[in-house]
Image (cartoon, grey):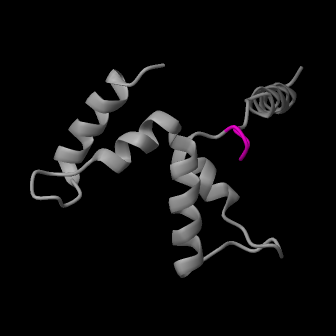
Amino acid sequence: MNKFSIAVAGLLLSGLAFAQAPVASAVTAPGAQGCEMRAIDKNGKNLAGAAKKSFMKKCEADAMGPAAQACEAKAMGKNGKALAGAAKASFMKKCVADAPK
């Protein structure tokens, strides 16, 4: 075989290896990435603006699960305001861990 034939064979084999790599589908993709892929309207176009923001909020809430949704409702500070940032993250982590399975 000449050098050209070897190079072509190598390219074909490497292409075959990449063709076999698994691809995450919109149905199985976790979290925001999965919601981002499913954010399309009835005409098949990507959502934008307020419609996309609303869809993403609902989709991510649905993906959280019932324990996380209950904890989200309880995430209030001493002053009655909703927790945010690191305080909310810490509260949510502890609350979900303590929730009955």
Across and down, in percent, residue 93 comes to 30, 32
Across and down, in percent, residue 22 comes to 73, 30
**Considering only vertical position in the picture, is 74 above or below 84?**
above
Q: In screen coordinates, is 9 left or right of 79?
A: right
Q: Is residue 11 magenta?
A: no
Across and down, in percent, residue 10 comes to 78, 26
* Residue at the image position 10 percent from the left and 51 percent from the top: 78
Furthest residue to the left? 79
Q: In which quarter of the image is the N terminus?
A: top right
Snapshot quadrant of residue 95: top left
* Residue at the image position 66 percent from the left and 64 percent from the top: 39
**Considering only vertical position in the picture, is 89 above or below 22?**
below
Q: Is residue 26 magenta?
A: yes
Query: Disc count in the image?
Result: 0
Q: In screen coordinates, is 17 left or right of 96?
A: right
The answer to which of 47 and 89 lies nearer the viewer is 89
**Considering only vertical position in the picture, is 42 above or below 36?**
below
For the magenta stretch, what is the residue range?
Answer: 24-28
* Residue at the image position 22 percent from the left and 37 percent from the top: 90
The answer to which of 43 and 16 lies nearer the viewer is 43
Across and down, in percent, residue 3 comes to 80, 27
Main secondary structure along the magenta-highlighted residues: loop
* Residue at the image position 59 percent from the left and 55 percent from the top: 59
Q: In screen coordinates, is 76 left or right of 2?
A: left
The answer to which of 16 and 53 lies nearer the viewer is 53
